[in-house]
Amino acid sequence: MTEFAALAQLTVVAMVPYLLASLGTMLGGLTGVFSVSQEGVMLLGAAIGFLVSYGTGSTTIGILLAAGTGAVFGAALGWATTVLRLDQFVVGLALFFAATGLAGLLYRIVIGQGATTPRVDTLPRLEIPLLSDIPVLGTALFSHNVLVYLAALLAVGAWFFLYRTRAGLDLRSVGENPKAADSLGIPVVRNRLWTATVGGALMAVAGAYLPLVYTGTYTDSIVGGRGWLAIALTFFGGWRPQFIVLGALFFAAMDVVALRAEVAGIDIPSQVLLVVPYVATLLVMVFAFRWAKVPEFLGRNYDRESRTA
């Protein structure tokens, strides 16, 4: 395996948490529900995924239960902001703190404060026959675990659904002008609820990916700010799946470059290397905000009885 192929493979692996969390953010945001609880939901998903996999020996069950937990938090956000019409930012922060605290609590209840950190088996690599034999590209794209392929399929499926189906057009109209959508018979509340729920599930799976693919173990710092970066990435991608994929690759490449520089022993303080992805994010966002199109009704609650949208 060449150095370039190895870096490309690592970048694709590192891309998945960013991609899943950003797709979850995008999905709710396109109907107007803006979440700021990504970091906490990802951490809870990581804890649930790890603990269930550790207890049952099944990563599949761990991922499914993590997704279910994230869905509950997403549904809570959707219900509180759509039905009760509470402030989205306040509810999102409350869910972030609740998920973060619950993740640490569950780990300490199940595992305790042992001297050794337990581990689980990470997802095995699944090479696609023939395609994985292609030089460079085969290693970079077709020699990964199942969650990498699933994330790619979700991105393609999201693009097709949003921009090639009537249901996708209806969904996007809810985030642009819910009053007009409602007048045309499009179920505004239902769309906001299900997108927030599915979005929460994707965020939790993004978190579960980290211990079940990356590390094989869990720590309270395992998410490492990826949830906050997912919000920036969604804006960077203009709330469109195809551009979010490109942004996720860019952010993941920054992670891999920083990691490789640290492993190579380059005489740069580790703190500087850790801040590289955030600096890159700030620089990119300066230009991205100039062209990114944000859903018109993002972060606002819809009141059917109001005279305005």
Image (cartoon, helix red, strand yellow):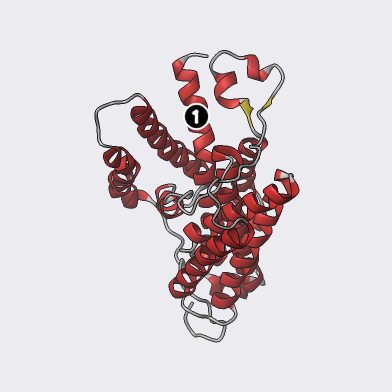
Residue holding disc 1: 10
Please determine whether, in this image, residue 215 is positioned above or below residue 23.
above
Q: Amino acid at mark 1?
A: Leu
| Quarter of the view holding residue 215 | top right
Across and down, in percent, residue 56 comes to 75, 49
Q: What residue appears at the point 43 percent right and 41 percent down from the top-left corner?
A: 247
Across and down, in percent, residue 67 comes to 66, 55
Residue that extends furthest to the front in the rendered view of this protein: 115
Across and down, in percent, residue 23 comes to 55, 51
| Quarter of the view holding residue 268 | top left
Q: Nearer the viewer, residue 83 or 62?
A: 62
Residue 125 placement, left or right of 80:
right
Q: Would residue 184 be visible to someone looking at this image?
A: no
Q: What residue appears at the point 55 percent right and 20 percent down from the top-left corner?
A: 137
Please determine whether, in this image, residue 285 is positioned above or below residue 129.
below
Q: What residue appears at the point 63 percent right and 56 percent down from the top-left corner?
A: 48
| Quarter of the view holding residue 201 | bottom right
Across and down, in percent, residue 113 comes to 54, 56
Q: What residue appears at the point 62 percent right and 25 percent down from the top-left corner?
A: 143
Is disc 1 placed on a helix, strand or loop? helix
Q: Nearer the viewer, residue 146 or 177?
A: 146
Residue 226 placement, left or right of 304:
left
